[in-house]
Image (cartoon, helix red, strand yellow):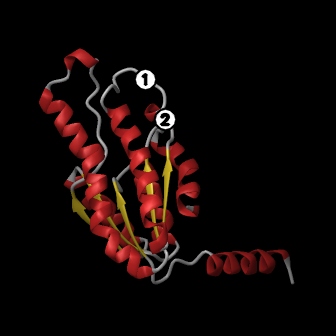
Amino acid sequence: MGEAEAEAEGSSSKDKRWSLQGMTALVTGGSKGIGHAIVEELAGLGASVHTCSRTESELNNCLVEWKAKGFQVTGSTNNVGNNIGKAVSDYTAEDVSVLTSTNFESAYSMSVLAHPFLKASAAGSIVFISSVVSAMPANFTPIYGPNRAAINQLGRYLAYDWAGDNIRLNTVAPAVIKTPLAQRVKPLCFYL
């Protein structure tokens, strides 16, 4: 067998070994950054993916791009994860409410809504994307950081409560990542 044939054979066996055909995934924030990289990875391996984004035009552009690649991706406009960069004393009660609703309550609600489907699959998995600011302060993240810390703790509790339902739960807490660097987080999220 020649080198090119061996490489093609290796690639083919890798694709079979890592196939996600018949699997379904929900990825929030899929129009850019880490979310976009994760959608591409999962759909590229055959999963049907539904994603969401805050911006309808960005989402529609991505959906066109993914359709051209032959990926099975659908989308809707909403999202989890946001920050309003201010100093602590500059936040209004509304800012805190919006951030907590977006960053924590939505993740909780989506997890609870997905629970029956994940349980029925007998091999469900949730991967929360948190942030390094959940463990160490950074400028202009005094509400976002505690919200991400709450996600870390929610992940622990859901993992504990749902382990008997064969649902795994992991949390990944990267630092600030510019879109090209999302490629480094993507394999870890896929693995989990």
Specify the quadrant of the image occupied by residue 121.
bottom left
> What is the three-letter code of the residue carrying label 1?
Ala
Quadrant including the C terminus: bottom right
In the picture, measured across the screen, residue 6 lies left or right of residue 137, that is right
Kindly state the secondary structure of the residue where label 1 is placed: loop
- Which residue sits furthest right? 1
From this viewpoint, is residue 72 visible?
A: no
Q: Which residue is the site of mark 1?
A: 138
Kindly state the secondary structure of the residue where label 2 is placed: helix
Q: Position of residue 60 (x, y in %)?
A: 25, 61
Q: State the residue in front, 78 or 43.
A: 78
- Determine contact: label 2, label 1, CB under 8 Å: yes
In the depicted structure, whether residue 6 falls above or below residue 66: below
Q: Earlier in the sequence, mark 2 or mark 1?
A: 2
**Residue at 44% in and 24% down:** 137
Give the number of the disc on residue 67. Answer: none
Quadrant including the N terminus: bottom right
Q: Which residue is the site of mark 2?
A: 132
> What is the three-letter code of the residue carrying label 2?
Val
From this viewpoint, is residue 133 visible?
A: yes
Q: Position of residue 113 (x, y in %)?
A: 27, 67
In the picture, measured across the screen, residue 121 lies left or right of residue 183, that is left
